[in-house]
């Protein structure tokens, strides 16, 4: 699987204090430089919605999460039409940028893997 939910070195980096000390500032700089927080987005708002697993995960969000996501998307579209990012006080703060969709996408992927496993099982009579 490729994309934002593919193989991650984060657990390895977080287990090493030295690596974390070197990589954390670069990761923070990169997230700030990407600019998605200036438009009020969370990281999971940027996932490609055309993927089947993301579509199914979006269906599992609570009503509040769906509303918040739609609000962020509309607010960012409005800022894009105005050709300027949101005011500084409306930017997404790093501590608020949590992964709300990833657990659902991982769960959908596990279910698909389990379904593929059971679809290929051969039954043998004794």
Image (cartoon, rainbow, N blue to C red):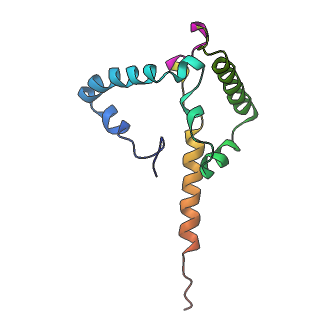
Left or right position of 75 against 1 = right
Q: Is residue 93 above or below residue 115?
A: above
Residue 11 position in % (x across, y down) = 36, 38
- In this view of the protein, which residue sits in the foreground, 65 or 70? 70
Answer whether residue 92 is visible to the viewer in this image.
no
Left or right position of 71 against 5 = right
- In this view of the protein, which residue sits in the foreground, 107 or 85? 85
Taking the spot 54% from the left edge, 20% from the top edge, the residue there is 37
Taking the spot 46% from the left edge, 52% from the top edge, the residue there is 1
The image quadrant that residue 78 belongs to is top right
Taking the spot 76% from the left edge, 34% from the top edge, the residue there is 63
Residue 72 position in % (x across, y down) = 67, 24
Region of the chain picked out in magenta, as a range: 88-94
The image quadrant that residue 100 belongs to is top right
Residue 91 position in % (x across, y down) = 57, 14
- How many numbered discs, if any? 0
Taking the spot 67% from the left edge, 20% from the top edge, the residue there is 81
Please check the rendered image and state whether residue 91 is part of the magenta-colored stretch, yes or no. yes
């Amino acid at each position: 699987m490729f994309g934002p939910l593919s193989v991650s070195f984060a657990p390895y980096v977080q287990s090493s204090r030295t690596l974390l000390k070197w990589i954390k500032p670069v990761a923070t700089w990169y997230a700030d430089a990407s600019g998605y927080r200036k438009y009020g987005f969370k990281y999971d708002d940027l996932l490609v919605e055309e993927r089947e697993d993301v579509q199914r995960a979006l269906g599992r969000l609570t009503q509040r999460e769906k509303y918040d996501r739609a609000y962020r998307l509309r607010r960012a579209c409005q800022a894009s039409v105005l050709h300027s990012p949101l005011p500084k006080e409306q930017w997404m703060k790093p501590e608020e940028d949590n992964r709300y969709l990833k657990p659902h996408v991982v769960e959908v992927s596990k279910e698909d893997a389990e379904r593929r496993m059971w679809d290929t099982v051969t039954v043998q009579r004794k």
